[in-house]
Image: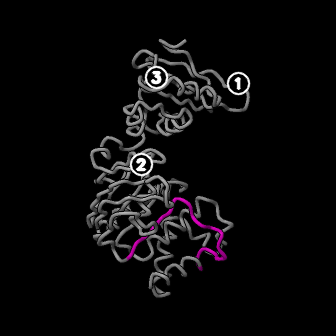
Amino acid sequence: MRLIDIYARYHRGGLWVLRGVDVELRPGETVVITGRNGAGKSTLLRVAAGLLRAGRGQVRDRPAVVGWLPERFPAGQPFDVRDYLQAMARVQGLTEAVAEARIMAFAARLHLAPFLRTPLRSLSQGTQRKVALTQALLPRPGLLIMDEPWEGLDAPSQAEIPALVAEQVASGGICLITDHRGRSGDLGSVRRLGVEEGQVNERLGERVSGVVGEERAAREANEEPNATTSFERLGERVSGVVGEERAAREANEEPNATISTDMPASSGPAVGVAPVKGGVTTTPPGRHVIEVVVQASDSPSVVASLRAAGYDVRAVRGES
């Protein structure tokens, strides 16, 4: 499949969201699209899926069957889950028996079975995402496009994403995914394309891969990452009991300075941090301590955001 010299925008006279994009998507590969919010990742997916017509350029050799997982699921429809999935299967040419077998298989994998007779509009956002993912997978698509597939899913369903992607590419299909939280590291061998200022290329994809890569790209462009966004990303990287990736160091602090924080137990003042022995933070029973290490090149607003969110941040060397 080829996207050739693609220009795309959402209305006549508007700014081009994509400009001169040339991309080849090969059978049996997973392609991860990275880039900051608003860079054009979702627009690229919509053009690839055929949902947005390119203003200029051509899309060639798109597979006949496309599975589409949108960022937002249109839940305001008069169906329950099973009836909706059966209707989508009929649109794709599946018989009722084949559709039912596949619906039940994905319902088991995604923990959707208890909700099959629940009206779509009564579902939580996370369960809506499971329904959307199931309908994308039902027809065995030659091209599976997923916009942030981990978003909104519970942990067991998120854990299914690598296996679902592996099955797609093992059958010779193409899998095209956006990822701005760095979750695509779980997918094994992938090809990365980066989107920046309407341009798409593999060099940028290697530079801007996952959350840390996005922050680095922003700094290289002399842009200050939004304080709130930096804090949310930092939360994704926090070490300690949540078991997430540890970040690096804080601006204006000595290298390797460590900020230890407690999660506030109530709306009142947070309790002080647990004592440190031999460089290891100990945790009294019933308390969760999160150790945050931020990068030396990060903005001081990151620490300020932590404090503003109610964390009790212990003073460390180099910080007043």
Quote the CA–CA distance across marks 3 and 1: 24 Å
| Amino acid type at mark 2 | Arg
Number of numbered tags placed on the structure image: 3
Quote the CA–CA distance across marks 3 and 2: 24 Å
Residue at 42 percent of width and 41 percent of height:
211
| Residue 20 in view (yes/no) | yes
Task: Bin the neighbour count of mark 1 within 10 Å (Cα to Cα): few under 14, some 14-19, many 20 and up.
Answer: few
Which quadrant of the figure contains the C terminus? top right
Q: N-terminal of the two: label 3 or label 2?
A: 2
Give the magenta-colored segment's residue range.
Answer: 65-83
Task: Bin the neighbour count of mark 2 within 10 Å (Cα to Cα): few under 14, some 14-19, many 20 and up.
Answer: some
Residue under numbered circle 2: 183
Left or right: residue 60 compared with residue 44? left
Left or right: residue 83 compared with residue 100? right
Relative to 152, residue 66 above or below? below
Q: Secondary structure at mark 1?
A: loop
Q: Secondary structure at mark 2?
A: helix
Residue under numbered circle 1: 269
